[in-house]
Amino acid sequence: RKEVEQDPGPFNVPEGATVAFNCTYSNSASQSFFWYRQDCRKEPKLLMSVYSSGNEDGRFTAQLNRASQYISLLIRDSKLSDSATYLCVVTSYTGGFKTIFGAGTRLFVKA
Amino acid sequence: DTGVSQDPRHKITKRGQNVTFRCDPISEHNRLYWYRQTLGQGPEFLTYFQNEAQLEKSRLLSDRFSAERPKGSFSTLEIQRTEQGDSAMYLCASSLWPSGTGETQYFGPGTRLLVL
């Protein structure tokens, strides 16, 4: 079992749709959680950090569920420019530093 | 531009040759990371530095790979006796530690390596 798992997709949605991605992680000692966005042949860019209380940034909402060991990303009112791969990232410091990226979920938003 | 920079952006080499990549982090960042990414996968952690100290190395990092950060600023990643399986995007990231908002890593544009 991979340490961080994501549905690879692709998710094909029309403009204006709401889409949600989940990511599960296996290390219960994980301490920091992030969503990154990666466009084709570009570097990953931070989308948002994920906190236990949940956090929102415009059309994007991230949630962390430590009991079930998953994080989620909700995108409302999808735009064409949201088309990208979304990477879930989990960091732990117990027993040595470890940052694990999921393989990513591909999103295509179509007109 | 004050972001993370990497050089070269692309490298084509023949199997068995040595290659070296450079990363310049964001100037005030004390941590620097190297990752490798292949098609369809997320970045895989290779190693990281805090200032000039190399604190962690992945088991993925074979004896042919070495990384340095001699003055705690830029870093180099060298691959000796390259193999076709080394073909990948090599990403560098930096962060400021400690950080009250969680350790956010900022990535450079990557060096794309092709081993023929």
Image (cartoon, rainbow, N blue to C red):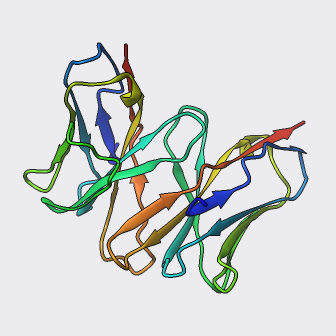
- List x then y, in percent, for residue A75: 78, 60
In this view, which residue lies farthest toward the left?
B71
Q: Quadrant of residue B28?
A: bottom left
Question: In the rendered view, would you say B109 is above or below B56?
Answer: above
Q: Nearer the viewer, residue B76 or B106?
A: B76
- List x then y, in percent, for residue A66: 63, 83
Residue at x 32%, y 40% (from the top left corner): B5
Lateral position of residue A14 relative to residue A67, left or right: right
Question: In the rendered view, would you say B52 is above or below A27?
Answer: above
Residue at x 31%, y 67% (from the top left corner): B96
The number of numbered badges drawn on the structure is: 0
Question: In the rendered view, would you say A7 is above or below A90?
Answer: above
Residue at x 87%, y 58% (from the top left corner): A18
Position of the C terminus of chain A by quadrant: top right
- List x then y, in percent, for residue A103: 60, 49
- List x then y, in percent, for residue B95: 34, 62
Position of the N terminus of chain A by quadrant: bottom right
In this view, which residue lies farthest toward the front?
A1
Lateral position of residue B16 relative to residue A96, left or right: left
Q: Quadrant of residue B48?
A: bottom left
Lateral position of residue A96 relative to residue B80, left or right: right
Residue at x 54%, y 31% (from the top left corner): A41
Q: Nearer the viewer, residue A8 or B28?
A: A8
Q: Nearer the viewer, residue B93 or B43?
A: B43
